[in-house]
Image (spheres, helix red, strand yellow):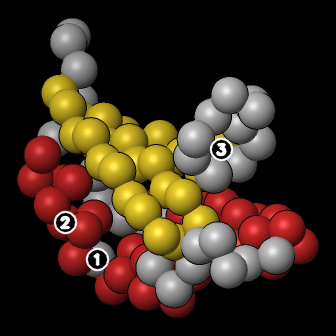
Amino acid sequence: MVKHVILWQLKDTLTDAEKSTVKQDIKEGLEGLAGKIPGLTDIHVYTDGLASSNADLMLDSAFTDEEALKGYAVHPEHVAVADNKVRPYTATRTCMDYITSP
C-alpha cells in the first residue's frame, strides 16, 4: 500500500470566514473522490488542527500501489478539485509519499 500525505497552509490574504469555507470545500472535494479513482482505497482531509500546528489542512490518503497514485495525480476529477478548490487558496504544500510495511 502507498500512503500520500499532504499538508497545506492557506493564503494569509483569506479572512477567517473565507478560510473556514475553503477548508470545507477542499474536504468535500477531495473526500468526494472516494470510489471514483481506480486504486484509491482511503481518503480523508483533516481541517481542525491543534493550536500547535503550523498547517491548515492535511490530506491522508492511501492507494493500492505507486501506479494508482500516479493515476490519481492526473485523473480528471482529481485535477478539477485541485485546480478549482485547492491551488487558488493555498500558499504552501508539503507532500510525503511512502510505501507502508505489510
Location of mark 1 (residue): 75
Please say if the residues under marks 1 and 2 sit with CB atoms less than 8 Å apart: yes
As helix, strand or loop, the secondary structure at mark 2 comes to helix
| Towards the viewer: 64 or 45 | 45
Disc 3/disc 1 C-alpha distance (Å): 22 Å
> Disc 2 or 3, which lies upstream in sequence?
3
Q: Quadrant of residue 3?
A: top left
The residue shown at (58%, 41%) is 54
- Numbered badge on residue 46: 3
Question: Could you tell whether 4 is left or right of 30 in the image?
Answer: left
Looking at the picture, which amino acid does disc 2 mark?
Gly
| Residue 41: image location, x then y, percent | 40, 43
Q: Residue furthest left?
A: 67
The residue shown at (15%, 61%) is 70
Disc 2/disc 3 C-alpha distance (Å): 23 Å
| Label 3: few (<14), some (14–19) or many (≥20) C-alpha neighbours in 10 Å | some
Looking at the picture, which amino acid does disc 1 mark?
His
The residue shown at (42%, 63%) is 92
As helix, strand or loop, the secondary structure at mark 1 comes to loop
The residue shown at (74%, 30%) is 50
Q: Quadrant of the N terminus?
A: top left
Please say if the residues under marks 2 and 3 sit with CB atoms less than 8 Å apart: no
| Residue 84: image location, x then y, percent | 52, 89
Query: Quick check: can you spot residue 43?
Result: no
- Numbered badge on residue 71: 2
Q: Looking at the image, is 37 positioned above or below residue 58?
A: below
| Towards the viewer: 23 or 28 | 23
As helix, strand or loop, the secondary structure at mark 3 comes to strand
Say which of marks 3 and 1 sits in front: 3
